[in-house]
Image (cartoon, helix red, strand yellow):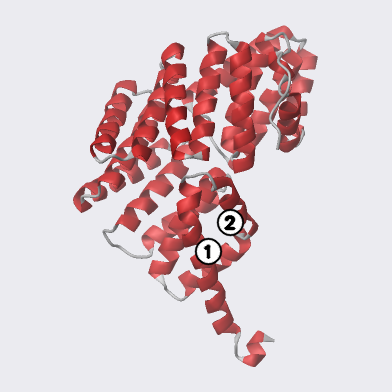
């Protein structure tokens, strides 16, 4: 009917303009802040509309609209696990025009982070180094410190702890010089992650809780969840199972609201450590299976420490059960809806660690 009336192209243009505006309006909220989960849900509900807008903007060669929409959707693709799709859009947006702008640094950073989450560290490093070089040429301190910080996470994943520390400390120094509280929080968070990888669990817990306080002051939801996860993983390794359980259940609740499957998997792995060390190997096996399914569904690779933790917990859990029972329970975790496993863990609040109550919606 639109074709017959001659209004099809005008309607497509108006549709693309509307959803471009929605994506751009959402971006400040999906990157950080207390409303992150709500805005991410809004974008997810409209994901097909946003895909159509991107397709139209590309077809009419509106490079600025196409690139800014893709950049604005990067947090959705990263947090909600649309890793391969998001990477395709972002790479295509980068190829649509060659310019040296802040938007280009953001696109390079976004595709680098998706490649990192997929375990493609070589590609991630290439994109992030290009972002750093361009940010330095543009003289934009915020983009320089972000690129240094992100390159540090890749260095951690590759086992270059000394290199990662230098990058995080450089990022921290730039943030402090510019009174960039968000940059300070990111660097502090990643220093906690580095301590986890170095097996300095006392420092990891202290640094994680320090970054948690920074995220609290900023009102940042994703940052709080990540800090709680790191603190919980460290507490579990220190044998403080009740504290670990509380921290990880709180992180699990926030990660569920955000829709971050990668973070949910990390929390489930941590709770599996708490479970098996509390004499609940059957529960640990299910949690481990659910964590594997979550990562497999989005094509994410666990960070080095979490990958080794998962494998070690699998081994300990396997030793505590008969071979048949272990395989059955892990498979049960893999085949059960991850949302169901998460709700069970939250509903127990968690009995895994032996304390009452639990988070409420």
Displayed quadrant of residue 299: top right
Say left or right for 34 vs 168: right
Please identify the residue farthest to the front as the structure is shown: 217
Dot 1 falls on a residue whose secondary structure is helix
- For residue 293, what is the image quadrant? top right
Chain-order first, disc 1 or disc 2: 1
Picture disc at residue 240: none
As displayed, is residue 339 above or below residue 247? below
Q: Which residue is mark 1?
A: 22
Does residue 299 appear anywhere in the picture?
A: yes
How many angstroms separate mark 1 from mark 2 (CA)?
A: 8 Å
What's the residue at 23%, 37% (across, down)?
A: 177
Mark 1 Cα-neighbour bin, 10 Å: few <14, some 14–19, many ≥20: some
Rendering coords of residue 152 (x, y %) = 34, 32
Confirm or deny contact between disc 1 and disc 2 (CB under 8 A).
yes
Q: In the image, 45: left or right of 74?
A: right
Query: Which SS class for mark 2?
Result: helix
Could you tell me residue 39's position as x and y percent? 57, 53
Q: Residue at x 45, y 23 (%)?
A: 208
Q: Which residue is mark 2?
A: 43
Residue situated furthest bottom in the rendering:
5
């Amino acid at each position: 009917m639109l074709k017959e009336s001659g209004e099809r192209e005008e309607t497509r243009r108006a549709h693309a303009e509307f959803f471009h505006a929605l994506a751009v309006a959402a971006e400040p909220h999906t990157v950080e802040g207390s409303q992150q989960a709500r805005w991410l849900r809004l974008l997810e509900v409209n994901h097909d509309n946003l895909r159509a807008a991107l397709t139209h903007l590309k077809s009419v060669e509106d490079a600025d609209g196409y690139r800014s929409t893709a950049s604005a959707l990067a947090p959705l693709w990263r947090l909600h696990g649309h890793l391969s799709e998001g990477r395709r859009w972002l790479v295509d947006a980068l190829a649509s025009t060659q310019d040296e702008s802040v938007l280009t640094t953001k696109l390079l950073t976004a595709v680098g982070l998706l490649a990192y989450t997929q375990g493609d560290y070589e590609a991630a490093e290439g994109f992030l180094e290009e972002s750093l070089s361009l940010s330095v040429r543009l003289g934009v301190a915020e983009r320089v410190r972000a690129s240094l910080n992100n390159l540090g996470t890749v260095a951690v994943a590759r086992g270059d702890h000394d290199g990662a520390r230098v990058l995080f400390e450089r990022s921290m120094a730039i943030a402090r010089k510019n009174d960039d509280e968000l940059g300070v929080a990111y660097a502090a968070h990643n220093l906690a992650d580095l301590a986890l990888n170095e097996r300095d669990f006392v420092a990891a817990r202290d640094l994680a809780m320090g970054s948690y306080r920074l995220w609290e002051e900023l009102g940042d939801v994703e940052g709080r969840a990540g800090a709680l996860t790191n603190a919980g993983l460290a507490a579990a390794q220190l044998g403080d199972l009740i504290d670990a359980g509380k921290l990880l259940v709180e992180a699990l609740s926030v990660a569920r609201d955000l829709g971050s499957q990668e973070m949910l998997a990390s929390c489930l792995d941590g709770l599996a450590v708490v479970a098996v060390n509390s004499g609940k190997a059957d529960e640990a096996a299910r949690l481990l299976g659910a964590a594997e399914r979550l990562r497999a569904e989005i094509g994410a690779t666990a960070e080095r420490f979490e990958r080794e933790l998962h494998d070690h917990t699998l081994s300990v859990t396997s030793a505590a059960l008969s071979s048949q029972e272990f395989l059955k329970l892990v498979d049960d975790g893999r085949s059960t809806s991850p949302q169901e496993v998460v709700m069970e863990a939250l509903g127990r609040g968690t009995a895994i660690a032996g304390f009452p109550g639990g988070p409420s919606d």
